[in-house]
Image: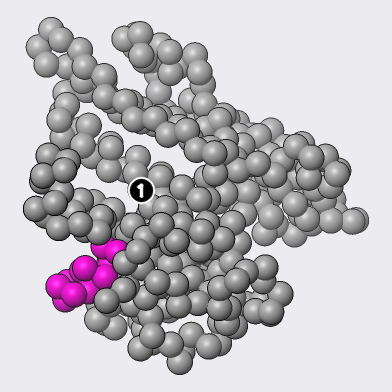
Amino acid sequence: MKTKVGIVGYGNLGRGVEKVLQYHDDLELVGIFTRRDPDSLDTASRAYHMDALEKKTNDIDVLILCGGSATDIPETAHMYAKNFSTVDCYDNHRDMPNHFKRMNEAATGGENVSIIGTGWDPGVFSVQKLYSEALLPNGESYTFWGPGLSQGHSDAVRRLDGVKLAAQYTMPSSEMIKEIEDGRDVSYDKFSSHHRVVYVVLEEGADADIVRESIITMPDYFEPYETEVHFISESEYNKNHTQLRHGGHVIRRGYTGDNTHTYKTTLDLDSNPEFTASVAVACARAAKRFMDARQFGAKSIFDIPPMYLLNESRESLIERLL
């Protein structure tokens, strides 16, 4: 029997989940749930207004929450978790312990499962950092994001008063990456090793100085990073800032006696939202398996047995991959 999936929200991530689901024979899309007029969505899938969700509790095994991390997920995710098992792509690293606590309380109370913080960072990169630190306990870890467009940060800027369109690019220090790979000592922290570049189309009459200040002082997203803000026309935005490429590196440099080892994971993504969606969809399968085992509550990417992510038996995986 197929696992029945619902999508909440139909932006870039929601469209990515819809596309990715076609590659998973054991998962079935029940519908897309939106605050907009369902008839306005450009989709061949069934679309419903958000109000219809309350009548779908028996029709959906897992909801994939595709709202933004700035406000949607922290304000609404725990409410969905009371009635549904959920997967989200929340990406506010600093708030993750609080988010886990909120989701665990809601999911446990509703006898549901909520897998939080899926995607590539948090998500895939988080797992690689865990593996690399376990294998090389004597060492240092480095994470670099970009160059590429960040969905979460762009969404956070678009929610500011006076902003019509926005694209935020995370730019890593290529010099520092090379120094680490060459075995040289570096003074690393995530703030000094990256800077952020934001392109903004203002609403008519908006004050550019106020918008700029709101961006560079935004906690958890821009402060205290070095941040450039550029104001551009809508035509320039549509011409140059609608691609969704992203990626990055996780590097662990570890030591065993006199020997140095480098553990490196690299992602080069043509579509940030479609890869993020790919991770969320695999985690939806895992959520259903936790439900079947009655292991209720919130789960992080660390809690998922790798076998839960693929639609294969243990025997098949051992034969094929081990």
Q: Would you say 110 lies left or right of 37 here?
A: left
Q: Would you say 61 lies left or right of 131 here?
A: right
- Camera-side residue of 298 and 40: 40
Q: In the image, is residue 86 part of the stretch drawn in magenta? A: no
Give x and y (percent) for residue 78: 40, 74
Residue type at numbered disc 1? Gly
Residue that sits furthest to the right in the current view = 205
Q: Residue at x 75, y 37 (%)?
A: 240
Q: Residue at x 16, y 35 (%)?
A: 134
Q: Residue at x 20, y 12 (%)?
A: 260
- Camera-side residue of 26 and 112: 26
Q: Residue at x 71, y 40 (%)?
A: 241
Q: Secondary structure at mark 1?
A: loop
Query: In this view of the protein, can residue 46 be seen by the observer?
Result: yes
Circle 1 residue: 123
Quadrant where the N terminus sits is bottom left
Q: Which residues are magenta?
A: 284-298
Asked if residue 181 is positioned above or below residue 229 in the image, the reply reads above
- Camera-side residue of 165 and 307: 307
Give x and y (percent) for residue 80: 42, 78
